[in-house]
């Protein structure tokens, strides 16, 4: 069993430049968790490149099981990244799938 954690964020930034900077900060912060949070099996994160108006940034992370997802969410480094994300995000959507 693999748990796939999928998250979408809508950013608060109103200008394209600020939105791009905030998205880059999210991407850099989350990518830096690879190798630091041992529960991460695979991680893909990035901004919307098609210019859709629904969500600005998406994250897909794979874990071995729900317990690994829970440890990831409680990890101090993940919490630091989450604190930054909360300062630049207006809305969030998340789902966890068994794949």
Image (spheres, rainbow, N blue to C red):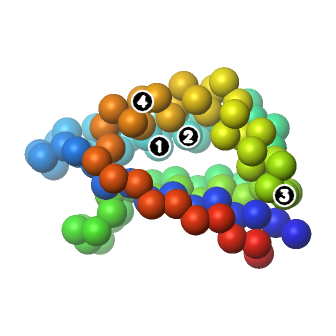
Q: Could you give the CA–CA distance between mark 2 and mark 4, rounded to whole angstroms?
A: 11 Å
N-term-proximal mark, 2 vs 4: 2
Q: Answer few, some or many: residues within 10 Å of disc 3's Cα (few below 14, many 20 plus, some between 14 and 19).
A: some
**Looking at the image, is mark 1 or mark 4 earlier in the sequence?**
1
Residues under numbered marks 1 and 4 in contact, where contact means CB atoms less than 8 Å apart: no
**Residue 8 visible in the current orientation:** yes
41 lies above or below 85: below
Quarter of image, res 97: bottom right
Q: Which residue is mark 1?
A: 27
**Label 2 Cα neighbours within 10 Å, binned few <14 / some 14-19 / many ≥20:** many
The span from disc 1 to disc 3 (Cα, nearest Å) is: 24 Å
Q: Is residue 37 left or right of residue 87?
A: right
Q: Are marks 2 and 1 in contact (CB under 8 Å)?
A: yes
Please, what secondary structure does the residue beneath circle 4 have? helix
| Image position, residue 33 (x, y; %) | 65, 35
Is the residue 87 above or below the residue 97 in the image?
Answer: above
Distance of mark 3 from mark 2, alpha carbons? 19 Å
Q: Whole-Å distance between the Cαs marked 4 and 3?
A: 26 Å
């Amino acid at each position: 069993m693999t748990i796939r954690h999928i998250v979408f964020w809508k950013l608060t930034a109103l200008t394209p430049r600020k939105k791009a900077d905030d998205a880059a900060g999210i991407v850099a912060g989350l990518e830096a968790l690879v190798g630091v949070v041992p529960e991460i099996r695979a991680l893909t994160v990035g901004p919307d490149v098609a210019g859709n108006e629904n969500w600005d940034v998406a994250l897909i992370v794979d874990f071995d099981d729900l317990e690994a997802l829970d440890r990831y969410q409680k990890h101090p480094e993940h919490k630091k990244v989450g604190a930054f994300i909360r300062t630049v995000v207006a809305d969030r959507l998340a789902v966890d799938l068994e794949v």
